[in-house]
Amino acid sequence: MPAWRLVWLNGSMRYADPALCPDCRSPLPTGVPVCPTCQLLVRHPLAVDLFRTLRRADELVVELRTASTAFHGQPAAPAPAAAPAAATAAPLGGPLVPPGAAPAQKRAVPPPPRPAGPPAPPLPPYPGAAMAPAPERRGVASASVPKILLGLGAFCLLVASVIFLAVSWSALGVGGRTAVLAGLTLTAGTSALLLHRAGLRIAGESLIVVALGLLALDVFGAGASGWLGDGGDGVTACVAGLVVAVAGIVLGLVRVGGEPRLVAPQVIAGIGTAVAYFGTLDVTDHQLLVGHVFTALAIGAILLARSQDLPVLAWSQAVAGSFAWLGASGLALTDSLTEPDLHQLWIDGSGWSLLVSAAVLLVPGLVVRNRGLLLAGASFAAMVVTVVVTLPSVDTDTTTVGLVAVAVTAAWVLVLGLLPRSFRTIAIAPSAVGSAILAGFSLVTVVVAFARWADLSTGFERRFDLTIGGENPVTEPLLLVPSLLVPIAFIALLVSARRRDHLAIWAQVAAIAAGIGAAATLASYDVTLALPVAVLTLVALGAAAAALMTTGGRAAGLGVAATFTAGAASIAAVPSAPMTAIVAGLATASAVVLALRGTEAVRMSGALSAAPFLGLATSASVYAFGGDAAWVAIPVLLAVGLLALGRPRIEIELPAVAVALITFPISGAETTDAGGYTALWLTVAGFVFCASALIHESRRFGAWIGAALLLLATWVRLADLEVEAPEAYTLPLAVALLAFGLWRMQKSDTVGTAEALLPGLLLGTIPSLLWVIGDPVSLRALLLGGVCLALTIAGASLRWSAPLLVGATVGAIIVFREIGAYPGEFPKWVWIGFAGVLLTVVGITWERQLLEVRKVVGYLGRLR
């Protein structure tokens, strides 16, 4: 049977048939992945491509027949159905049947003519793979089995060869050793080439690895026999690596019988080059020369590989050459840093080696002829050359080193700005390395300045005339501002598009950095503390003003910069209490202005920082006027509380609460009356929360917090004083709260009694209720009961929920407490009867409600 027998239907032949195997044309059962006759993979992706090709052939035949009919002037015969339409109606693995035909007539019905327009969508692979998913492949792939077996076989052969030589080496003579090694190597190499020529590529790759491994063993055996002289293991490793590298390159170039070139020798050639390099390092003192020689050899091998289209060999030699280049350049840099003077560097030293290493960086771009890679190599080469030229300055003082670093980096940054965009890459690497060095110098200067300030900071002192002193700076402080500006210029040129608005943004960044650097520079000398603090304050105020005059992300960045700079100025002024009060006060005013007038992001930064600045200014003011830590918490609480009352925003209130909570334990630890101070602090906090709830409708929930704080303050104070009559302390505050609440209700109709009166009512009744519970038979109980009765009647008359709720609840508690002393005197049947009556009432009520529900359901059911 021919392999490509055609299928005939109504006098026309069709190539694509999903019901038949494309090779042997035998019928395909439903859902099989392999043809049962010829074992062809009918679900393979290639089967999809084959079916599409055959389908296109059917379409071309139909078009050719139509064209032929028109050419001969005959009436057009009905075109047979295209393969896609038939395949759509065909069952899986079944014959091609038009839909709706009887079984006996299915082959005789002529297909409809092919409609005009685009071809039908592609069909699933043989036979209907889209409707019956292919079985999931499990286990190891078939192609992986020979790779695994042959890889293990090659490894076993190498191990066996090593063991054989180790065991039998002493028993063999020189001739025997030579014959064994040469025979094994030639046998493995010849077998590998023959197998590769026969198409067994995996076997050939495996055995060529064995052959090259045996070749390395040949060289090591020759070295052990003394044939390579007395150079030791280094000479043996060098010779073995070179021999294996040359053999790998030759075998990689050989093409046997038209088959693809072997890959394993190309990889092993790179390994041999690296082994030869490390072996040579062990036997010579000219390590720099060795590194450059092997780098040159690797470059030559790469050029040969590219000319012969051997990418694997090129990459393996590139890796080996990288080891040699890194070894030579690293050793040269280490020697140059050890003795960086001019004579040692250029006469007896390794300056020339660094220049050669820099030149090698240009080779990758030249080899692959890639402009971007060439420019990147030129950039790194320029960086290496710059290091070589400036290394002699390392042997001088830090001022000279700083001047050279600033000048050279500034020159490269200037080159970066002047070069055309297509060549700017050249200046990036030296500019980046120089900027990193300048950043290190700046960090050292700032750390020393901070250490000098820390020696001065002993807490809040009540005087201005404080002078900074301490250890001398390690670097030159006058170079701090240039060391900050040059890296900023580099970053600006690197990330910006040289637009005017971008340059304006980076100019503002540079101005802020210069101001901070000037403050740190001043702190590096023995000057009064007010000078660096004044500089930081001016920078903060300038940044805040700039934030108010701009919009968008630029304004947000300036607002954040203003906040952090103001914080730095406030902290720097901490050794002097009057200075801290002034600086923190200015920072508070700046933050409030930002919170009121800036954009959304600027308002956020100002609101978050206003309360901390205000708390610091208040604390410093307390110290400046003769106070101490014991007097700090209450003024701070009042200050931040008033700020939160004025601007009820969560970004102001949360920092205010945090500041108040931080300062409270500081004062509590210093005061002699912790209980009284705590009660006073809780009372002020409660009043602040209640006032915020009464003034601002959005803060009504604060009434509950304020009431709780006031109640807690009362308990703390009464417990501290061991007072048995709390009304003298609670009633005045309760009356004040009630009066304030009534005034608030009169001013606004939207204020409810719960927000306005509940805190005062709870403060006036709960403390007395606690004493009534402990002593129910007393004049206090009678008076509190009368008050509760009056509150209940007044609340019911005026329809105010708070008096009604408090009067009824507290009065009920008093009544239950009064009867609590006598329940044991009642007979048990009274309590049982009371329970029965209660349960009966509940049951009747439940049944009545259930009956009403049923009536409603019935009524709804009768509706139409």
Image: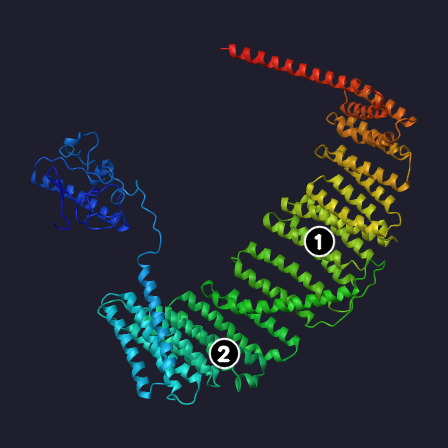
Disc 2 marks which amino acid?
A: Leu
Q: Which residue is mark 1?
A: 541
Report the number of discs.
Answer: 2
Counting from the top left corner in percent of width and height, residue 278 is at 45, 79
Judged left or right of residue 154, residue 765 is right
Label 2 to label 1: alpha-carbon separation: 50 Å
Q: Which residue is mark 2?
A: 354
Residue 663 lies, with reference to residue 495, above or below; the image says: above
Residue lying at the far front of the rendered structure: 828
**Foreground disc of the pair 2, 1:** 2
Q: Which sits in the foreground, 395 or 31?
A: 31
Residue 326 lies, with reference to residue 644, above or below; the image says: below
Q: Which sits in the foreground, 254 or 582?
A: 254
> Residue at (64%, 14%) from the top-left corner?
847
Residue 488 at least partly seen:
yes
Say which quarter of the image contains residue 199: bottom left
Disc 1 marks which amino acid?
A: Leu
Counting from the top left corner in percent of width and height, residue 746 is at 79, 25
Q: Residues at badges 2 and 1 in contact (C-beta under 8 Å)?
A: no
- Mark 2 surroundings: few (<14), some (14-19) or many (≥20) residues within 10 A: many
> Residue at (74%, 72%) from the top-left corner?
472
Say which quarter of the image contains residue 694: top right
Judged left or right of residue 791, residue 418 is left
Q: Which sits in the foreground, 160 or 655?
A: 160
> Residue at (86%, 47%) from the top-left corner?
674
Q: Earlier in the sequence, mark 2 or mark 1?
A: 2
Judged left or right of residue 155, residue 810 is right
Judged left or right of residue 858, residue 844 is right
Say which quarter of the image contains residue 441: bottom right
Residue 366 lies, with reference to residue 137, above or below; the image says: below
